Amino acid sequence: MPPLFDKLAKGVSKAAEQAKFEAEKVRMTSALNSEIGKLKAQVLEAKVAIADKVLELRAAGASFPELEPLIAPIADLEAQVAAKEQELAAVKAMQFEGGAAPAPAAEPAPPAAPVAPTAEAPAPAAEAAPAAAPPRFCPNCGAKLGEGAKFCPDCGTKIG
């Protein structure tokens, strides 16, 4: 082969090896990100299980003074969730009756501000709303899934 073609062949071979290396790097990165996401989802599920147990024990009369500022706002937030779920059910139950779209309800309530822990926790509600389902995560990449998701919004994996 003439020297020019040898040089060209070596360059193409080197480029192919580099592309192979980069492809393997992307594959390994993706696999590790997936594993990390799964582990993070397991950590979050474990934390949710701990929180659920603490709330269950508190409802049974156990006292957690150091956690009270974090626990106390939960009943209020659950009540807000329950109210929004009732609104959602009412909207879903609406039937088309011809004419224009239904009139919007009065000014929607502003979203609840995040609740910061305080030194003095408000008294807990007498009866807490049922606990919401724990969050779900993609088994492939660990992304948080919306309620009823059929596919992961991040990686597109079909959800069982």
Image (tube, grey):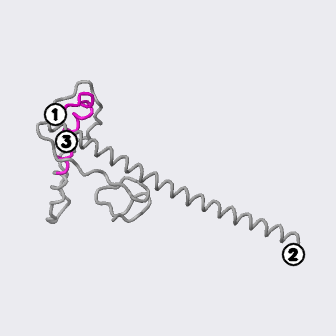
Residue for badge 1: 124
Q: Is 10 in front, or is 79?
A: 10
Tell me the quarter of the image containing the N terminus: bottom right
What SS does tag 2 mark? Answer: loop
Tell me the quarter of the image containing the C terminus: bottom left
Residue sitting at x 52%, y 57%: 30
Quarter where residue 103 is shown: bottom left
Residue sitting at x 23%, y 24%: 120
Task: Find residue 66 and report its horizontal and vertical position in percent.
Answer: 27, 28
Could you classify mark 2 by the number of other residues whose Cα lies within 10 Å: few (under 14), some (14-19), or many (20 or more)? few
Residue range of the region highlighted in magenta in the rendering: 62-85
Task: Find residue 14 and report its horizontal and vertical position in percent.
Answer: 74, 64
Q: Relative to 29, is 60 on the left or the right?
A: left
Q: Is residue 66 in the magenta section? A: yes
| Disc number for residue 56 | 3
Q: Amino acid at mark 2?
A: Met
Quarter where residue 73 is shown: top left
Q: Residue furthest left?
A: 126
Task: Find residue 136 and report its horizontal and vertical position in percent.
Answer: 32, 54
Q: Residue furthest top?
A: 119
Q: Tell me whether circle 1 and circle 2 mark residues in contact (CB < 8 Å).
A: no
* In the image, residue 24 above or below residue 126: below
Q: Which numbered mark, 3 or 2, is in the foreground of this view?
A: 3
What SS does tag 3 mark? Answer: helix
How many labels were placed on the picture? 3
Residue for badge 2: 1
CA distance separating discs 1 and 2? 85 Å
